[in-house]
Image: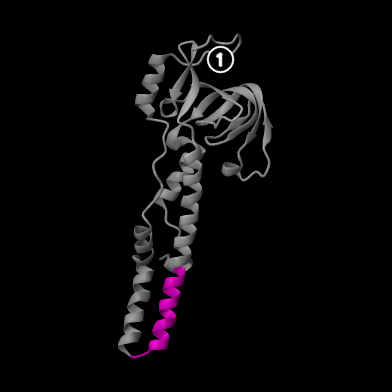
Amino acid sequence: MTAVPHGAAAGLTGDEARRRLAAYGTNTVQDVVQHPINRAVKKLWAPVPWMLEAAVLLQLALGEYFEASAIGFLLVFNAGLGFFQEGRAQATLEALKSRLPLTASARRDGVWRTLPAAELVQGDVVKLSLGAVVPADARLIDGSVLIDQSMLTGESLAVEAGAGFQTYAGALIRRGEAIAEIVATGARTKFGHSAELIRTAHVESTEQKT
């Protein structure tokens, strides 16, 4: 542990951090990956797919094999398209989740400590240095860094950031050092919101929607 630099934010006390952790939960994001078989079944288990499946069976019963094949192709094509889009979104989020740090340098009770990133809470003050990954959504309060947020924002280039700049969990520090205050953790981060949307919503084609 090291002494607190002069003029930097004081951070939280251990007692206050524990209170906030109990009130708001850990700085973790729920797993977004679903088993491929489950995702495939869900693409075929809905009102509109049921209608198409019934139509295929009816055409087969009537001996209309060409019509049955055409309807079956439409059914499989739309299910496959939704499956692919959903899988790509999940893969992107899992890639980002895999790079989130396991630990972070945070100021508690007036000294710097290396803490599990999962224990960070809103109001914590953290140190961001070269090669570090931002552990939660944060606002810079001191220092200057070159920060890469491309996986989160789609920006093609890293950006210079100083006091007042807000960054997000998963961003990478390319140069410099800064002190930042955590403004959101876990499911309340930008990444957490995206993961929750993927977890609860299913990509549906027009033909699958009722």
Q: Which residues are magenta?
A: 63-78
Residue 69: in magenta span: yes
Above or below, 2 against 50 in this view is: above
**Dominant SS type (magenta):** helix
**Element assignment for label 1:** loop
Task: Determine whether, in the image, residue 141 is placed left or right of residue 199.
Answer: right
Which residue is found at the position 53% from the left and 22% from the top? 126
Above or below, 201 against 162 in this view is: below
Above or below, 210 against 128 in this view is: below
Which residue is found at the position 36% from the left and 80% from the top? 56
Q: Which quadrant holds the C terminus?
A: bottom left
Q: Is residue 101 visible?
A: yes
Nearest to the observer: residue 42 or residue 93: 93
Q: Quadrant of residue 181?
A: top right
Q: How many marks?
A: 1
Amino acid type, residue under disc 1 in the picture: Ala
Nearest to the observer: residue 39 or residue 62: 39
Which residue is found at the position 50% from the left and 45% from the top? 95
Q: Position of residue 83 (x, y in %)?
A: 44, 61
Which residue is found at the position 51% from the left and 49% from the top? 92
Residue position marked by numbered label 1 in the rendering = 9
Q: Position of residue 94 (x, y in %)?
A: 46, 46
Q: Quadrant of residue 148?
A: top right
Task: Determine whether, in the image, residue 23 is placed left or right of residue 150.
Answer: left
Mark 1 nearby-residue class (10 Å; few <14, some 14–19, many ≥20): some
Q: Position of residue 74 (x, y in %)?
A: 45, 75
